[in-house]
Image (spheres, helix red, strand yellow):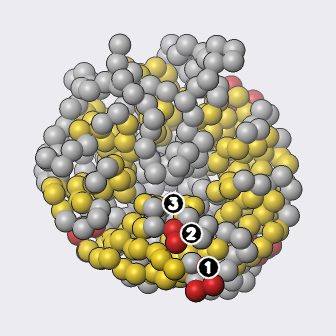
Amino acid sequence: MSRLSIPLITLAITLAGLSSLPSAPAPKAGEKTADWTQFRGPNRDNISPDKNLLKEWPKDGPKIVWKSEGIGEGFSSVSVVGDKIYTMGDKDGMTYVFALNRASGKQLWAAKVNEAKSFGGYEGPRCTPTIDGKLLYAIGQKGDLVCLDTEKGEEKWRKNFPKDFDGKFMRAWGYAESPLVDGDSLICTPGGTKATIVALEKLTGKEIWRSPAGDNAGYSSIVISNAAGVKQYVQLTSSGTIGIAAKDGKFLWRYKKTNSNVANIPTPIVLGDQIFTAVGYGKGGGLLTLSGGGETGVTMKEDYFSPKLVNKHGGVTIIGDYAYGDTDDKGNIYCAEWKTGEIKWNRGRNGKGSGSCAITYADGHLYARYQNGYVALVPATSKGYEESGSFKIENAKRPSWPHPVVIGGKLYLREQNILWCYDVQAK
């Protein structure tokens, strides 16, 4: 996470945000586009629906379509919906949500969230905006939750986690959650004893229920599970992985082994009646099975827990029978059978990437983005780690961790205050 180093410029220049490279073809009127509506994609599983992508990259990497400068410092990834891209960043002492043109990268609007503040020595927001039709939801690092119009960035309503819910987060790194839209509700994690998780009316921000589970907010994002026939929200908080009834916020279960006591970050993964959940800082990951339901409540059982499946903040992606993730933040990717926890391979010293690695998946391949700016294309198989191409992001000079996104034949990489768009569609 880098320090803010952007010179002061006017908001007019901010909104101009001109690209210096050729534009991609704009979607035609009425044309359906592939969208990435929120952090880790529509299903929060980090799996892209894209097909017919490059199986190998040129020596210098895929073709750059455009770059968009001036999006501020931060670690937010991107949401890509229709003809726009959305992200967040700190600029000129303020935290903003930015909207960019999908075809050119040109900045369309910037909406203020809060005054910028460094947490744990790192500037910049951590949330990726969540898009729901004509509305956008985003959380600043100070706990300011905003609902914006996607067309012009006009504010519809806002809440503040500490003030409105007595919210608290674990340790020193601020709020990092990407909020969840579920039907007519917005679900998020203020943390603390009074409102660990809350459900709000997405159109107004009015409170529906609050769950006083007693956990401070971690740095993860909520997923939906229907395990054991009970719709529930699964979240990694300061005290481990928990399940909360979607109907009324009733506390259902807690798994304490996924608690690093430092920063609990990776998003849990829903697998039918099972949950894969991992945490970093030397802890590990494991598989849970949920059963029961009805009047008996939900019973949580641990199938296994393995310190070899440790993951700090690059996230874990499950494809078929296998789970892929970075070993803590070592840049040493593992492939493991998610049903048993058995490791099939580790990356070792192959390739030039180093430091924490964030992984996404598309069309048979892992897109591995390393902390030192190297990005690798790796076949998603259980046979071993073998790169089908790699390159270094041009402006990569300091550690940076925003997750990569592959959608609509494009690869999006956030590096400091620049968003890069690459063409990865096979011709």
| 21 relative to 124, above or below | above
Marks 1 and 2 sit apart, C-alpha to C-alpha, by 8 Å
Residue type indicated by callout 1: Gly
What residue did someone put label 3 on?
122
Marks 3 & 1, CB-CB < 8 Å contact: no
* Mark 3 crowdedness (10 Å alpha carbons): few <14, some 14-19, many ≥20: some
- Residue at 63% of width from left, 84% of height from top? 295
- Which circle's residue, 2 or 3, is located before the other in the chain? 3
Name the side, left or right, on which 392 lies relative to 348: right
The amino acid type of the residue labelled 2 equals Gly
Distance CA(mark 2)–CA(mark 3): 42 Å
N-terminal of the pair, mark 1 or mark 2, is 2
Give the quadrant of residue 367: top left
Q: Which residue is mark 2?
A: 229
State the mark number for residue 267: none
Q: Nearer the viewer, mark 3 or mark 1?
A: 1
- Compared to residue 112, the image places residue 214 above or below, namely below
Residue 13 on image: x %, y %: 69, 29
Circles 1, 2 touching at the beta carbon (< 8 Å): yes
Could you say whether the residue bearing mark 3 is in a helix, strand or loop? loop
Classify 10 Å Cα crowding around label 2: few (below 14), some (14-19), many (20 and above).
some
Q: Is residue 132 left or right of residue 173?
A: right
Instruction: Classify residue 368 as left or right of residue 23.
Output: left
